[in-house]
Amino acid sequence: RRFTPVGHSSRRAYMAKKAKGKGGKGGGKSKGPSEEELAKQANAVKNFQKAHAASSQAHGVEPLGIATGTGEAAFGCAVVGPHLVAADKGGVTALHVRALLEGFSLSAYGYLQTLALWNVPIGDDGAAYLALYLRRRSCTLRSIELNDCGVGELGCKAIGGALEDNATVRCLQLDLNAFGDAGARALGASLPSNKGLTSLSMQYCGLTEAAGAILAGGVLRLPSLASLELRGNDLGSGGVVEVLRALVPLHAGGQPHPAMAHLGVADTGCAIEGELHEALTACFDENPLCGSFDMRGAPLGDTTAYELITLFKKVHTHVHAFEVSATSGWGPLDPQLYKQIYAVTAANQKGKKGGKKGKKGGKKKK
């Protein structure tokens, strides 16, 4: 990832604002960080680098060469991949991650928003070190990506416990960690007490059909959760049914899930028929907030597809995304029906945006 100064959503936006301040369109002053703020950020980077180096030396490892930008401004994203330490030197280990996180903690670095660890075998020890950092008051993380890191049940327990009292993290990715149903249960024991997590991804984590009930009684009790990705887990129709039922009033204490807007269950071994079809329809009927579904890989018959299209057109116009596959274990879906599913939901999405603009316009007229 390219270096982005803190306070700007992208480098392009940053450069556009900088140009604007130099007499570009609008002729106004740049809204970028002041010289005083930049000096403060540069000092924070230096303090982190010193603390990181000292902690690495204490643990007998080389400091990870994460991108820290030019040093003139703080960096908000730290990416750790296998390329940072050569394989013949042992690769990236849990101790490397420990030293990195201690560097952030000891220097009270307050600008880190995203921590991404990709394909580094830090295991449960590394997850435990991350959990310690999440409990620090200086932690400002909003997004955590632990993809293919060998995290197991104990690691899930540590992270879930740390997030129980954390109010900054919004997104947690745990894809490609084979922690299975036990890991999902460990997360569910603590996450419902979290105060702000909105997105959770557990793709290809070895979950089975039994995980449906585990998720329904665990992570799906997290009231702020707006997006749940479960792609590539062997949930089967039974597991997906349990997840869907957790989103509707009858199975959720009399109220639909208060935040869930997207559910991803692609390639989970389910089929849109029978009990699953009924659970989907019930979710459409009783939870108008949930309007995005990824059902790719789930067999879908032409008759059911036609029925769904009719519902999306006339009744459930809140469904603005319903992804399916053109072909499945049942053979190819009628090409026209396949196109109509995407066309109708796209129209619903467009109407949703138009409705928001209309409301704003109405306020202005008043």
Image (cartoon, grey):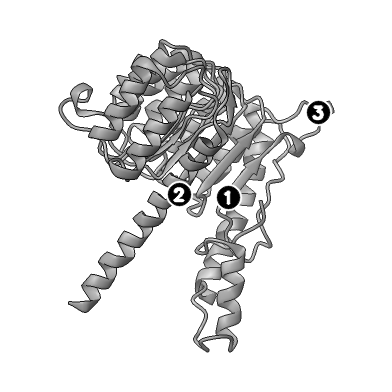
Location of residue 87 (image quadrant): top right
Circle 2 — which element?
A: helix
Front-most of 65 and 253? 253
- Give residue 346's mark: 2
Check disc 3 and report the residue beneath it: 87
- The mark that comes first in sequence, 3 or 2, is 3
Front-most of 133 and 83? 83
| Amino acid type, callout 3 | Ala
Check disc 1 and report the residue beneath it: 77
Question: In this rendering, would 279 be left or right of 109?
Answer: left
The residue shown at (61%, 34%) is 97
Q: Please tell me whether residue 344 is drawn above or below residue 7 in the rendered image.
A: above
**Image quadrant containing the C terminus:** bottom left
- The mark that comes first in sequence, 3 or 1, is 1
Q: Please tell me whether residue 85 is drawn above or below residue 244 in the rendered image.
A: below
**Residue at the right extreme, as displayed:** 88
| Amino acid type, callout 1 | Cys
Q: Please tell me whether residue 136 is drawn above or below residue 127 in the rendered image.
A: below
The residue shown at (77%, 26%) is 90
Circle 1 — which element?
A: strand
Real-space Cα separation, disc 3 to disc 1, in angstroms? 24 Å
| Amino acid type, callout 2 | Ala
